[in-house]
Amino acid sequence: MAYSDKVIDHFKNPRNMGSLDKNDDSVGTGIVGAPECGDVMKLQLKINDDNVIEDAKFKTFGCGSAIASSSLATEWVKGKTVDEALEIKNTDIVNELSLPPVKIHCSVLAEDALKAALADYVEKNDKKNLQGADKKERVA
Amino acid sequence: MPVNDSPQTETSSARSLCWSCRQDTGKGPFCKHCIKIQPVDELGNYFDLFDLGKSFEIDQNNLKKKFFALSRKFHPDYYSSGQDEEQKLARDNTAYLNHALSTLSDPVQRAEYLLSLVSGSYANSPTPPQELFEEILEVGELLESQSLSIDENTRLTHAGESFRQRQNELADSLAELFSQLLGGNDGAKGEIESRLNQIKYLRKTGARIETALMEKDNHE
């Protein structure tokens, strides 16, 4: 199977590979996997008080398409708000990377990782908001 | 049963009548009246095909013996001068038989198949094993690096051994869980699914480690 040029580009020059501190309250972490192919993807987002994604990092153990999908996802979400990031669909990744049908699950994995990271951030900060009222006031 | 059902469904076996003599075929792979080959996929499941009880634990030698006996009986070469229907059934049965063997000889496939037989469908949505994911990502980093130090190479080798060992332990533990499930304890299903899920990750990652170590050996 031939990879598209864009997949090869992301694979050879992955954007935003690495890690953020998962214990940081402003960081949301999503780790997901696909048991059928054994691929594992970690996506982390650093989100500021205005709900804007300031930084994104990924680490993926998997095939070229899985690496490219997560690399592209991190590239796309930077500068977006949480709500905007939630709009990203796996089909957008499929189209951008011209993924063949057998590799669509890689894009699904990237969307799942993104959703999981956002959910982790929201959960962390809901807890924080419940704990201290001052944070709530600042938001309001 | 509705009264307006067609006559065929009134026979005791689930299978339709013999394609050749139009009589009840009985339960074997050959019609009990005219001895013509019959479609074995209508016999029930893979366990029935090999005359084995539904169980996760299978005597693999016995399975292979039965497989060879059946594959001799269905061998398409024997039917090369037979009717078109016989030739087709010989091919179909052989394909079905091969698939049955590969499903039942592999612990993961066997477990999934047995789960689908027992509880209708195989859901495959257990809680993701987060700790294992972290471990896999660490291994992934080692695999990506172009050259490994002796220490890293040792770590990778150990990880590979550990993955294989845990995979085997989990697979062995399925036998007991399946006997609980088959004994009517539906609660065992979730645990089986969760362990199966882990086995799959351990197996895939283990295979990648092995390939990587082999390639690195070849370069030296």
Image (cartoon, coloured by chain):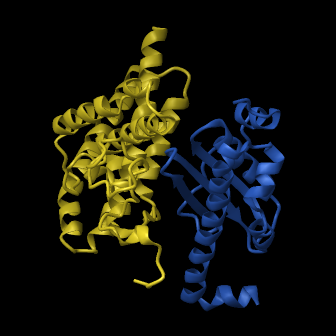
Chain colours: A blue, B yellow
Q: Is residue A27 visible?
A: no
Q: Position of residue B168 (x, y in %)?
A: 25, 43
Q: Position of residue B37 (x, y in %)?
A: 36, 41
Above or below, A34 relative to B219: below
Occupied quadrant, residue B34:
top left
Q: Is residue B213 left or right of residue B170?
A: right
Q: In what quadrant of the picture does the C terminus of chain A appear?
A: bottom right
Q: Please tell me which residue is depicted at 46% across the width and 32% down the height of the picture.
A: B208
Q: In what quadrant of the picture does the N terminus of chain A appear?
A: top right
Q: Is residue B132 visible?
A: yes
Q: Please tell me which residue is depicted at 18% across the width and 70% down the height of the picture.
A: B183
Query: In this orientation, which residue lies closer to the viewer: B186 or A4?
Result: B186
Above or below, A119 relative to A130: above
Query: In this orientation, which residue lies closer to the viewer: B33 or B146?
Result: B33
Occupied quadrant, residue B211:
top left
Q: Is residue B132 left or right of residue A127?
A: left
Q: Please tell me which residue is depicted at 69% across the width and 52% down the height of the picture.
A: A107
Residue found at the very far top of the displayed protein: B220
Occupied quadrant, residue A51:
bottom right
Give the tally of numbered discs.
0
Q: Is residue B54 left or right of residue A71?
A: left
Q: Position of residue A106 (x, y in %)?
A: 64, 48
Above or below, A25 relative to B24: below
Above or below, A55 relative to A68: below
Query: In this orientation, which residue lies closer to the viewer: A138 or A34?
Result: A34
Query: In this orientation, which residue lies closer to the viewer: B185 or A8?
Result: B185
Q: Position of residue B106 (x, y in %)?
A: 32, 41
